[in-house]
Structures are given as structure tokens and as C-alpha cells.
Image (cartoon, rainbow, N blue to C red):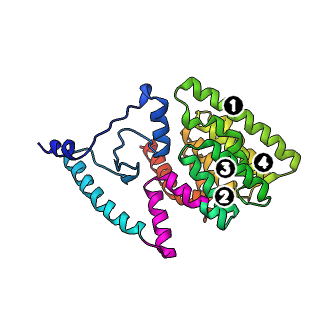
Amino acid sequence: MKSGEISEKFVAVRLTGGDDITPEVKEFMSRYGVRGYPTLYVMNAAGHVVVPKVGRTVDAMLAALAEGGTAETKFAELAAKTDPAGKKEYRDGLKGRMAWDDVASLIEADVKTAPSAEVYGELAGTYAACGRTADERATLEKALKLYKDAKDRTAWRIRLATMDHDLGKATSREEADQFVAASTKALEDLLAKMAKEKDSAGSAEVNVALGSILQRMGKADDAEKRFDAALAADPKGRAAPASLMGKANCAWSRKDWAGCKAQLEKLLAEFKDSEEAKNAPRGVENCDKKMASEKK
């Protein structure tokens, strides 16, 4: 049988999620970006994701395993490169493999030789990806002291306020509710600090973070109030595109297709170069389909 070829040459590992998920599996899912079931990866003994997309049939699995062998050979050649372009390609390759500890080691070297706000932010994000919370916290705290004018300063403060209550790490609805309450309180405290500092742009970002949490919990009306507050605080700032997208999502959850479309069109008109605008055309198209369907 073809399935025998898999068991003869490779070790099959199955992790169970859902109601039976353990903290260890939850950490694995976070580290490797698992968003749904089933998710199939080809990994090597070092924990690198060699093939990130694998089909469910035996033939597809055998093809992925063969692809993995080729990928390993190419990656070994990449690791041997010493020129700047080759080193960057190797680093990007490690990121693609979700080899976060190896990536962190490379960025740690950059922090020592060529420190910058961007490098510190990248290092903190990498620590977050591999679950090194203490290292992430220390990196962000140091970055805040070193770079008073960094563009990501508010994002760092938001992360520090909420990292101990990461909703993605909740293993039950009850725990999720506790995390939401704790994160909401921490962000409201941060919002009060922003008001004292007269930081309208920062206040907008914090309100977007609050709105996003409420939205994830299905509280669209409360979330929309936060997105409105963000727009009122800084209508043309960096948080505005996310606020408009948030309002569009709130309208969609209420099946207000016209309202959703209006927010997306405003996003496209006013912030066409934003990341959020990249997904807006498809959203507009989906709204049109919903409205057309209801007219039939």
C-alpha cells in the first residue's frame, strides 16, 4: 500500500485540538500559525516547516514528502552562502520555515552590531512567535527607553499591556472571557495615560485594539464605538484605515451589507495605499453579491 511508504520512511505525528487541546498543543499552534483543522505540515527533526501546504490524500502526502527532500537540499545550499544577498535569502528562508529561534539568533546579532527601532521591533515579534514572552517583554521595554520617537511605540505599549492576557492562548471560553476582561482593563488604563500625554494618535491606536478585542468576542456594537472613537481622535492618522475596516466588519456581522460597503469604499477613497485597502475590493464585491441575492 502507498500509505506504507510514509510509515517506512517518515514519522507521522498527530496533535489533537478542539475541546481536548492541551497547553503544549496550543503553544505548537501559536508557534506554527495553525488556524484550523486539519492542518498538515512536512517538518524536519529541527522543527522547521519544510512544506507548509500538504494535501489530504496519500498521493498528495507522498508528493509533499518528495518536495520536502528537494527543499532540504536547496536550503542546505542557501545556508552555505556568505554574501549579503545570500544571508538575507537564508534569513527569509528561516522565516518561511517558521524557525523562529534560529531567526532570533540572527536578529540578536543585528541588535549588537546595528541597533535600530526596526530591528528591536523585529526581534520582539520573533520572540513572540516562538513563545519567549520574557525575552519579548524585555526587548520591548528596552526599545521604549531607547527610541522615544519610534513609529511603533504605541504598538509596543499595547503589546506590553496585553501580552499576559493573549486571547490566542486561551484554552476555554471561560479563560477567553477572563483574558478579554484583563486586556480591556489594561488597554483602558493605557488609554487614560494617552489622554494625559495628549497623544491623540496613540489614543486612536489603543481604541482600535480595544475594538478588535470586542469584535472577536462578537460585540459588534461596542466594538464600533471604539472604532468611532479612534476616528474622532485621529481621523487621518495611521489607525484610521484599521478603524474603517473594523466598522465595515461590524456592519457585515449585523448583515448591513450597504453599511459595510460604504465603509470599504471610504477606505479605498481615503487610504488607497494602506494594507487594509488591499482587501477592500473583495469586500465590496461580497457586499454587492449579498445585496443582489436579497433582491431576488
Q: Gap between marks 4 and 2, in whole Å?
A: 23 Å
- Mark 2, residue position: 120
Q: Gap between marks 2 and 3, in whole Å?
A: 26 Å
Front one among 38 and 15 = 15
Q: Gap between marks 1 and 4, in whole Å?
A: 19 Å
- Mark 3, residue position: 243
Earlier-in-chain disc, 1 versus 3: 1
Query: Which quarter shows the C terminus?
Result: top left
Q: Gap between marks 4 and 3, in whole Å?
A: 12 Å
Q: Gap between marks 1 and 2, in whole Å?
A: 26 Å
Crowding near the residue tagged with mark 2, few <14, some 14–19, many ≥20 C-alpha atoms within 10 Å: many
Earlier-in-chain disc, 1 versus 2: 2
Q: What residue type is labelled 1?
A: Ala
Q: Is residue 270 above or below residue 201?
A: below
Q: Which residue is drawn at 87% across and 51% down?
A: 198
Q: Which amino acid does label 4 sit on?
A: Ser
Query: Which quarter shows the N terminus?
Result: top left
Element at label 3: helix
Q: Which residue is drawn at 59% across and 33% down?
A: 217
Earlier-in-chain disc, 4 versus 3: 4
Q: Give the range drawn in magenta.
A: 81-108
Element at label 2: helix
- Mark 1, residue position: 182
Position in image of residue 192 (x %, y %): 83, 40
